[in-house]
Image (cartoon, grey):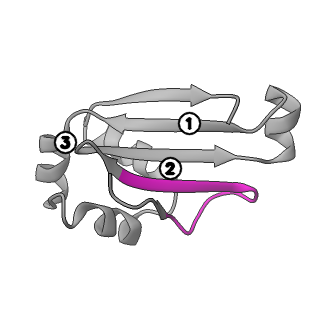
Amino acid sequence: MTAKIKLNGGLNKTVTWIWLDNNQLKVEYYDFSEDAQNTFGNDIAYILTVNEMDKLFWVSNQNTDTLIAWLAENFQSYFEIKQWLEKNKIGFEKEIDSWA
């Protein structure tokens, strides 16, 4: 697993982390806002796991050594990365953890 890198954008009281785990990209959106507390009774996290890494490397023109830095330079939040993955038809799984 590579170190988690925090992205610079996003809403107040939220954070996006990116890292590689078992050669898969993980993108975590953690929301600790009042809205999350009121809606879910706790903080909430959304985690994307990219399962088409070869396609991700090809489309981004990156590799395991450069991908995380490239993502941190080009995207500011979970939602920007998710939108880009969808636009480029790169497969991922989404997990929701309402007890974050």
Q: Classify mark 3: helix, strand or loop.
A: helix
**Which of the 4 quarters of the picture holds residue 31?**
top right
Residue at point 79% right, 27% down? Answer: 40
Q: Would residue 88 appear left or right of 35 to someone viewing this image? A: left
Is the residue marked by circle 1 packed among few (<14), some (14-19), or many (20+) residues within 10 Å? some
Q: Earlier in the sequence, mark 3 or mark 2?
A: 3
Residue at point 11% right, 51% down? Answer: 58
Q: Would residue 11 appear left or right of 61 to someone viewing this image? A: right
Residue 18 position (above or below residue 91): below
Is the residue marked by circle 2 packed among few (<14), some (14-19), or many (20+) residues within 10 Å? many
Q: Which residue is mark 3?
A: 53
- Which residue type carries mark 2? Tyr
The question of residue 22 being in magenta is answered with no
Q: Earlier in the sequence, mark 1 or mark 3?
A: 1
Q: Which residue is mark 2?
A: 78
Q: Classify mark 2: helix, strand or loop.
A: helix
Q: CA distance from mark 2 to mark 1?
A: 9 Å
Query: Could you say which is closer to the camera, residue 85 or residue 22?
Result: 22
Q: Would residue 88 appear left or right of 41 to someone viewing this image? A: left
Q: CA distance from mark 1 to mark 3?
A: 19 Å
- Which residue type carries mark 3? Met
Give residue 46's mark: 1
Q: Position of residue 46 (x, y in %)?
A: 56, 36
